[in-house]
Image (cartoon, coloured by chain):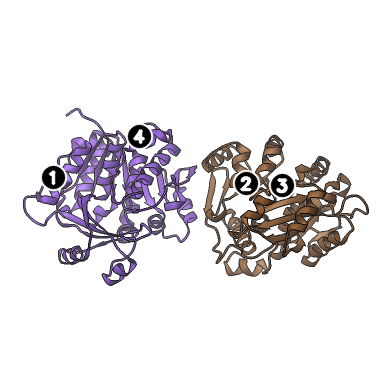
Chain colours: A purple, B brown
Amino acid sequence: MSESYDVAGIGNAIVDVLAPVSDAFLLQHNVAKGVMTLIDEFRAQQLYEAFSAVSEMAGGSAANTMAGVASLGGRGVFIGKVKNDRLGQSFAASLKALGVRFTTAMANDGPSTACCLIAVTEEGQRSMSTYLGASRELSPDDVDEKAVAASAVLYIEGYLWDQPQAKAAIEKAITAAKGAHRRVALTLSDPFCVGRYREEFLDLMKTRVDVLFANEEEAKALFEVEEFDGVLQALHAWPGIAALTRSARGCVIVRKSEAHILDAHPVARVVDTTGAGDLFAAGFLYGLTHEKRLADCGRLGAVAAAEVISHYGARPEIRLEALAAEAGLV
Amino acid sequence: MSESYDVAGIGNAIVDVLAPVSDAFLLQHNVAKGVMTLIDEFRAQQLYEAFSAVSEMAGGSAANTMAGVASLGGRGVFIGKVKNDRLGQSFAASLKALGVRFTTAMANDGPSTACCLIAVTEEGQRSMSTYLGASRELSPDDVDEKAVAASAVLYIEGYLWDQPQAKAAIEKAITAAKGAHRRVALTLSDPFCVGRYREEFLDLMKTRVDVLFANEEEAKALFEVEEFDGVLQALHAWPGIAALTRSARGCVIVRKSEAHILDAHPVARVVDTTGAGDLFAAGFLYGLTHEKRLADCGRLGAVAAAEVISHYGARPEIRLEALAAEAGLV
């Protein structure tokens, strides 16, 4: 196999079930606003039935990022576990349609394909309830070391830490990437996820992570600081690249003493923030693997994030390559 | 004279005439929104008559900063020219009441004391029409070299460049400060002011300015860049301290490779942004002359700015020392 990739993404393979809801709905159904909560199959059933006007589409944080990389014209491969059921097949088909390589073997038994029930309130804020299902079955056997070694960047989502079994798979992927002198990128995924695995993330950053993605809340949780400036100062001693997103405030990119403060890309109306961080990472990683300057990597991230928050769903509806060209970035 | 000061401020001595107006008023009377425009005595009369519900209070950019330094418990001296008329006397009395030393000789003839007609629209944005009057008469004779040499920082407002005669006074003050190994701080004052004197400001920064204050628009105009990040990158090569304010987005403090991104201090409601930059500088300079860490200098600036934008007028109504203590900064 002589094919090479820009990014290999590893994460939970999830189908998103989306519904616009009111704040009252969140209260009534006990959904924590703006974050990701893990739920079991029973609760997933309950919530699914309460959701009205649902749409279903392939999601998953790192998978969304891979969709974004492909939409920018980049080459990607995704590693994640679905069951060979209706949702699993639709998940696989969606990545293949975008040109993202996805060859992780589907489970033939066990829990069904993971789903994420996403409640979107009027102001565009999304609250996620995730049933991990088949995605929990990801094992080291699923990691295609050759594909990882052939990718300029290995991109890992923090949500994976919610599955004890995934750690061996992550370890195997990192070893393959480092063995081939590739970069390893980590996204912190969610402030509560950081709360659960803070020590492990910090430990990984010491020696094995080259690029960190985090939003403001995740970064504050990681360094246990109350102010954004505390994050910046904590990163001073870290040799990697940190891409910190701040919603409407834009993003800050830091590499040692180099800092870039970039505005958010303008959006006519924020409809649904689902996938904003995933798509930011897509734009940034596309830039990083195409010799763009650090500030332009951030701008590419901002363009991709702006597209995805202007409509429902976590994957781009407009070809990002065209938007990046319009913005003079490619 | 053995007295010493934290800050010596030099600037236009101006009385503010304030009126809440509508956007329609600005259009009807041809007032450019959000910036400072110089007007002659005739136009000042016209506008003054059109203003309703006026209040008059001592203002002037650097003088407001000195009022803020005093309100924080700092020691200051102000250099600026008024006429010995009603407004001039009220200007002098206001500084003395605050404990700011003000001994510049009043003019006994010539144009009357400067006034600034400030139109404040509903969202708190202020548009200023300035009649410079007596403040134009500032000359090198007015510069008390001993007081400047006895001050830890000399603070100069960019508006002074609008008076050709003031340059010799500025030069004398800088020479006195540098001769005593003091710091020189410059505030850019207004984006159009930067447009008028860009080369001179850049030239001064090369060798004589140690601390730069600018809001986002002023800084972009100075470096002729379109994005805030361009400012940040242009400052990388500059050895001084830059305090960059971004309105609701907070501020960024830069000293070579050290950068701090600080949030704006919360305000229940923005009433009138007049004096926001002046008071930010007050807090920052108080911090700088009291051995505070750079980030805390910025936070002191944010606290002072938050107070002044929460009411009409460009000088603090609440003792800033108490607010800074509440915020744990002093």
Can the viewer see residue B271 in this picture? yes
Give amino acid for label 1: Asp
Kindly state the secondary structure of the residue where label 4 is placed.
helix
**Separation of residues labelled 2 and 3 (CA atoms):** 29 Å
The reply to whether discs 4 and 2 touch (Cβ–Cβ < 8 Å) is no
Residue B314 visible within the image: no
Q: Nearer the viewer, mark 3 or mark 1?
A: 3
Question: Looking at the picture, do discs 2 and 3 lie on one chain?
Answer: yes
Can you identify the residue that label 3 sits on? B37
Q: Nearer the viewer, mark 2 or mark 3?
A: 3
Task: Work out whether residue A272 or residue B139 is closer to the camera in this orientation and state it.
Answer: A272
Type of residue at label 2?
A: Ile
Which element is circle 3 on?
strand
Measure the alpha-carbon separation of dots 2 and 1: 54 Å
Q: Which residue is mark 2?
A: B241
- Can you identify the residue that label 4 sits on? A322
Q: Position of residue B85 (x, y in %)?
A: 88, 59
User: Residue at point 6% right, 50% down?
Assistant: A108
Q: CA distance from mark 1 to mark 4?
A: 37 Å
Are tags 3 and 4 found on a single chain? no
Q: CA distance from mark 3 to mark 1?
A: 71 Å
Q: Which residue position is annotated with label 1? A: A141
Contact flag, marks 1 and 4 (Cβ < 8 Å)? no
Residue A23, by quadrant, is bottom left
